[in-house]
Amino acid sequence: MASNTTTDRSVLVTGASTGIGEACAVELARLGWRVFAGVRDDDSAKRLTQLVPSRLVPVRLDVTDSAHIAAAADLIAREVGEAGLEGLVNNAGIVVPGPIEALPIAELRRQMEVNFFGSIAVTQAFLPLIRAATGRIVMMSSLNGRVAAPFLGPYAASKFALEAASDALRVELRRWNIHVAIVEPGSVQTPIWAKSKSTAQRISDEATAEMREIYGQDIDAMQRAATSLADGARPVRPVVAAVVHALTARRPKTRYPVGMDAKLAVTFVPLLPDRVGDWIIRRSLGLK
């Protein structure tokens, strides 16, 4: 992928129904890519097709379903033929919030299944097509893939795991000139956080009275902090720009922290003593 021209290149974007995934799919299609957009329902497929009808191909894809992944791989392989797939953007993700002590193990597994195992399963399935095109892989991580926040432990764990696997994968695929980039957004305006609130409410409703009493004060503080962060969240455009750069630049970066909050956190928090970092995080979130 030495050239910056994009015409006739093909890319798969997972989690393209809303938010960052949808924005990436639309922008890449407008830049001339043939975009296979992974969606989970017909309404999303119809809406995306209407946005860029000539370049965007919706594909039913639940990244936790091996049959879905296999069917998508077969479909895309037939479409691209020997040219292969120039790009894969592993964007599908969810947030399972809450105190680790109170979260059902099934919820922890669901978090890892989507954000980590789903991304790895999709990557495994599409690597033959990526190799055929000497393509590129973009992993959508997060600020929380470098700095774990309280009550987002499962989400952070899934992104930490994704970053570790991506680092290993980048070295493993170097022989074939397949580049692996990690995008690390900070606070971004996306429906994923609104969905996480409903998940948090459901988990809270199902929690024992003891757990609600123990963590109630902290959860209230986190909800206030989440509302404040949502109000100050940035548009998805810089994240999309990072993805485009990772797919098209002659010398792509290995990591793309996006937003001042992400850049400051990944630069300075690791340099601090753990207890100092803990104090800063708690203070910033209004936790005692």
Image (cartoon, rainbow, N blue to C red):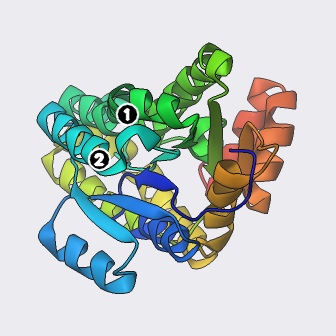
128 vs 233, left or right, is left
Q: Residue 154's x, y, as percent?
A: 41, 35
1 or 2: tag closer to the N-terminus? 2
Disc 2 marks a residue whose amino acid type is Ile
The answer to whether residue 53 is visible is: yes
Figure check: 140 above or below 109: below
Crowd tier of the residue under label 2, counting other residues whose Cα lies within 10 Å: few below 14, some 14–19, many 20 or above: many
Circles 1 and 2 in contact, beta carbons < 8 Å = yes
For image coordinates 23% across by 44% down, the residue present is 72
Task: Give coordinates of residue 263: x percent, y percent.
Answer: 80, 51
Q: Nearer the viewer, residue 265 or 13?
A: 13
> Mark 1, mark 2: which one is toward the viewer?
2
In this view, 14 is above or below 67 = below
Q: Residue at x 21, y 32 (%)?
A: 104
Secondary element under disc 2, as helix, strand or loop, is helix
Q: In the picture provided, is 21 more to the left or to the right than 253?
A: left
Secondary structure at badge 1 equals: helix
Q: 256 above or below 175? A: below
Residue at screen point 54% across, 73% down = 27
Camera-nearest residue between 136 and 214: 136
Q: Nearer the viewer, residue 173 or 99?
A: 173
Disc tally is: 2
Seen as rendered, the residue at the extreme bottom is 50
Q: Amino acid at mark 1?
A: Phe
The tag on residue 126 is 1
Q: Residue at x 64, y 75 (%)?
A: 232
List the residue tagged with mark 2.
76
Horizontally, residue 286 falls left or right of residue 19, namely right
From the top left corner, tell me how far across and down residue 212 is, in percent.
27, 46
Quarter assignment of residue 74: top left
User: Seen in the image, is 26 located left or right of residue 236?
Assistant: left
